[in-house]
Amino acid sequence: MKTVVVCGTAIAAYGFPGGHPFGPDRHDAFLQEFRRRGLPQAVTQAEPVMATPEQLAWFHTPSYIEKVRRLSELGHGLLDFGDTPAFKGVYEAAAAVVGSALLLVQEILNKRAANGFLPIGGLHHARRDSASGFCVFNDCGVVIEYLLAQNFNRVAYVDIDAHHGDGVFYAFESDPRLIFADIHQSGIYPGTGDEDETGKGTATGYKLNIPLSYGANDNDFRFHWPRVLSFLREKKPEFILLQCGADSIAGDPITGMAFSPEVHRQAARDLAQLAAEVCAGRLIAFGGGGYNRRNLALAWNHVVEELVQAALFRNSKN
C-alpha cells in the first residue's frame, strides 16, 4: 500500500479571485515542487471527487448548503462577514475538497492506501451553518462525523496551522470522541483557542490548545510538541487527522509565526510513527492555510515525503 495524494483541477479551483490570499495558484505551487522531487512515482495519485449534498449535511445545515449553492450560481456575495466571497463554481470546488477527503478515508479503511494527503483541504474555520476565514465547507468536520458514524470512538485532530481550528473545536467541544490538539498563534483570527479551553462536560480534558506568541520558532514548537504527543498517546486514537497549515512558517504574509518547514516534517514523521503504534497507520494530512507559495510547497512536500517513508516502512514489515 502506498500514500495516496489527491490533486486535480476540481480542488485547484478552490481559490478566491482578485488577489485574495487564498488564490487558486496554491495547488500548482504544491504540484510543481511535488513533481520536482519525483514524488508522483512514489505515491498513488487520485482525482478529486465531489461530495454529495447528503455527505455535506453530515456536518453542515441544509440551509447553509443551499445558500452556498445559490451564491455559487450567482457568482457574487459573501458567504460569511467579509473574508470569504462567493465566486462562480465555489460550491463545486468546496464540495470537491470534501469529497476528496472522504475518498482518502475510504482508501485507508478499505486497505488500498497506507495514508493520504490532500493539499487543498483542512478548511478548519467553516462552521456548521456558515463559512468563515476562507473556509466554505469543513472537510475535516465532515470526515470526523463520518468516522464517528462508522463506530470510531477516538478520532484525533491535530492542527499546526497558525490559526486556531475553531470550526472543528467548537463543533466537537462537548464530544469526548474527538481528541483535539492545536498549536497556533495567539492574538490573531479567530481569537480563540486559549489554554483553558479543554472541552466541556464529558469531553473536558480531551482538547488541548497551545497558543504561542508572535515570532514563535522551531525551538518553541519542539518545547511544546512532546506534550501533544504524550496527550495523543494517552488517548490512543483510532484515526489521526493532521491539519498542517503552512501559515505558521516564517514569511507568511498574514501571520507572525516563525517556524521553518522542518516543523511540518517533524510533525508528519512523529504522527505517522504514532499512527503505526496505535491505529494501524491510519493518518490523513490536509494542507490547510499558508499564503507564501514557497513555504507551502516546501512544507507540504516534506509532509508527503514522511508519509511515503511511513508507508514504505509499513510495507517492509508486512
Image (cartoon, rainbow, N blue to C red):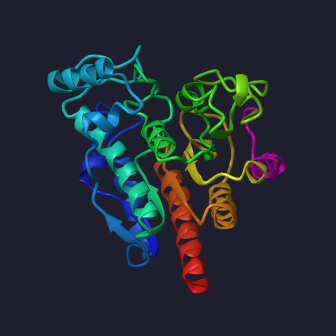
Residue 230 on the magenta span: yes
From the viewer's perspective, tell me whether residue 174 is left or right of residue 127: right
From the viewer's perspective, tell me whether residue 296 is left or right of residue 264: left
Task: Report x, y in % for residue 42.
Answer: 44, 77
Residue 12 sits above or below residue 275 on the image: above
Which is more toward the observer, 293 or 205? Answer: 205
- From this viewpoint, which residue is outermost toward the left? 73
Task: Report x, y in % for residue 101.
Answer: 40, 49
Which residue shows up at 38% across the image and 27% down it?
60
Which residue shows up at 35% across the image and 39% down it?
23
Residue numbers of the magenta segment: 213-231
- From this viewpoint, which residue is outermost toward the front? 151
Which is more toward the observer, 179 or 134? Answer: 179
Residue 301 on the magenta span: no
Which residue shows up at 46% across the image and 58% down it?
117
Where, quadrant-wise, is the N terminus in this rendering?
bottom left
Residue 146 sits above or below residue 110 on the image: above
| Rendered image quadrant of residue 104 | bottom left
| Rendered image quadrant of residue 192 | top right
Which residue shows up at 77% across the image and 50% down it?
225
Task: Report x, y in % for residue 280.
Answer: 60, 66
- Taken as a whole, is the magenta stretch helix, strand or loop? helix
- From this viewpoint, which residue is outermost toward the right? 223
Residue 97 sits above or below residue 106 on the image: above
| Rendered image quadrant of residue 179 | top right
- From this viewpoint, which residue is outermost toward the top? 81
From the viewer's perspective, tell me whether residue 299 is left or right of residue 101: right
